[in-house]
Image: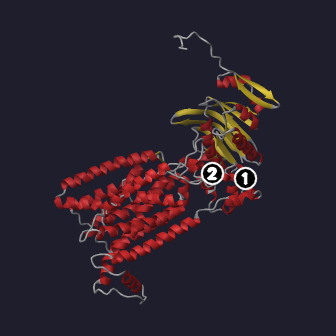
Amino acid sequence: MTLRLDHVSAALGGHPILHDVSLDIVPGELVALVGPNGAGKTTLLSVMSGDVSPTSGEATLDRVRLDDWKVAALARRRAVLPQEQRLAFGFRVVDVVRMGRAPWARLPQEDLDDVIVAESMHRTDVLTMAERSFPTLSGGEKARTSFARVLAQQTPVVLLDEPTAALDIRHQEQVLAEARRLAADGHAVVAVLHDLTVAAAHADRICVLAGGRLAADGTPRDVMRPALLGDVYGHPVDVIDHHGRLVVLPHLITVEKETPCAPVPS
Amino acid sequence: MTATLPGHASAVAEPVAALPRRRAARATALFVVLGVALAALTIYAGGRGQLAIPANEVWGSILHRVGLDWGTMPTHPQGDNTLWQVRFPRIALAIIVGAALSTAGALMQGIFGNPLAEPSVVGVSTGAAFAAAIVIVFQIQLVGSWTTALFAFVGGLVTTLLVYALSRAEGRTEVVTLVLTGIAVNAIASAGLALMIFLGDTQAREQIVFWQLGSLNGSRWEHVGVVAPLVLVGLAGSMLMSRRLDVLALGDRAARHVGIDVERLRLVAIVLVALLTAAAVSFAGIIAFVGLVVPHLIRMLVGPGHRVLVPASALAGSVLLLGADLIARTAVTGADLPIGMLTSLVGGPFFFWLLRRTRTSAGGWA
């Protein structure tokens, strides 16, 4: 099982976003996609999920082009956590997690639905809010519920678009630990992350995107170099080794004291 | 791959007991209440009218028809005839039309992921009205007295499919585009309708206006025989897609991620909506608000899951329309009120109350 991008370029609304990206995602690793705003992280994830077709190059899963997969069969091989969680009606949390079992309907695996749903909710710490209506949840609770839905889908490939964006540090660590555990269990996990320190701490491999191209691809220690990051983000950073963990610190922009044009009333 | 097989998860399955139960009891209670209400209302409505027939005689007449010689037959010489020639066909049509309109509403709200959607959004009603008006004004007699119904059915169906086809681009439909296309096509059909009213003589105008107000007056078994199979097909199709409709609430993209072929599901659903609504309006005319209000009410009672929502809406729609028709034909002696006027009269304020209620309760449209 491999998710392979081979010289992929992609466009959104006629505007080219990705240029000649080649990547192999293999089971057992957690890959972090990082890069500045507009670098094409979400688009790259959309190509991997089969939502966006490459304009050139090939995106394949198990050597079959993503466009050629049947919708239902693909849903049994890859799950996607979207950046935004929306829901049209007031389904309960448990019902939303159950939706992750939809691709397994009328298959032998359907018998395990209850077990898997309960376990997914347990892992993401949403069991206690199982009866609550999804639209009434906070942003973080919605994100965790959606993550539980993704876990319940039980797919070899798991794609997470900013899974920690709305989470506090406890739930952030919980979700990423869960993502790491998925990888350790033999899933291929790709996560778009914004926080470089968080990415360095959890990912097996970091892909840095800049301007729609792959600027770097390697282990955190290979990639988290001040020169490279400073170049990609257009802002100088320090990388500190804190008891074996890499911490990325952006330089502060000093606000120079200028004489004000008009005196500030005191 | 091995690690992902669901068998893996079963090994760590202790927390399964903590999973909340489905709302089965509540749904069952609702079905029982609605079923009993429908049966009781049928018997009651059968007895009401210019010629009053006691409930036990109505019951006796029904039993007699199914071959059981129990209970008392209607004592009035015309009693049995009135029941089976006039009232029961009308009751049956009310039940079928109510079920069709509510199911179409539930389906529509499901595929749009929008609680404000109703079949008229995609032009079913206006298209049907326009086609019916053409028949009335030009006195087309293609299939005798059935011509209006046939044209209304085809008009509704064609308008809906036209809206769908026009809003499709690159093999996809955006919901907003669909709604806006619906508005545009609705406007054109309304203009056509206005032209027909302008062209028609006084009598034709009157007929068009009353057709648009909706009425079950003059229902016959033949009408029931035509509408019932269409509606049954529509109901069965809706039930088959109910589980997939739930997932559509996640939005198009996320629904695709969990294996739903959104475009195909939406196309089938729109065809079903057109079939149900067009069949309903063909003989009954336009009956507003049933498709919008009933699914809301059911959602408030048993939640948004479509496996319960769709059949419960159908049943509740039947009860509602049967009740409305009973009022329409008995409220004023010697007059048959337009049923569409009644449903709007009750549905409007009720919907307003619903809006207020959902706004004050947490989650808005929950």
Position of residue A264 relative to residue A36, above or below, is above
Residue B202 occupies quadrant: bottom left
Which residue: 69% across, 48% down? A124
Mark 1 closeness class: few <14, some 14–19, many ≥20 residues within 10 Å: many
Q: Amino acid at mark 1?
A: Thr
Which residue: 44% across, 71% down? B37
Circle 2 SS class: helix
* In the displayed structure image, the side of residue B205 where residue A20 appears, left or right: right
Q: Position of residue B165 (x, y in %)?
A: 41, 50
Color encoding of the figure: secondary structure
Q: Position of residue B258 (x, y in %)?
A: 60, 52
- For label 1, the residue is B4
Asked if residue A26 shows in the view, the reply is no
Residue A74's tag is 2
* In the displayed structure image, the side of residue A48 where residue A183 appears, left or right: right
Q: Amino acid at mark 2?
A: Leu
Which residue: 36% across, 84% down? B57
Q: Position of residue B294 (x, y in %)?
A: 43, 60
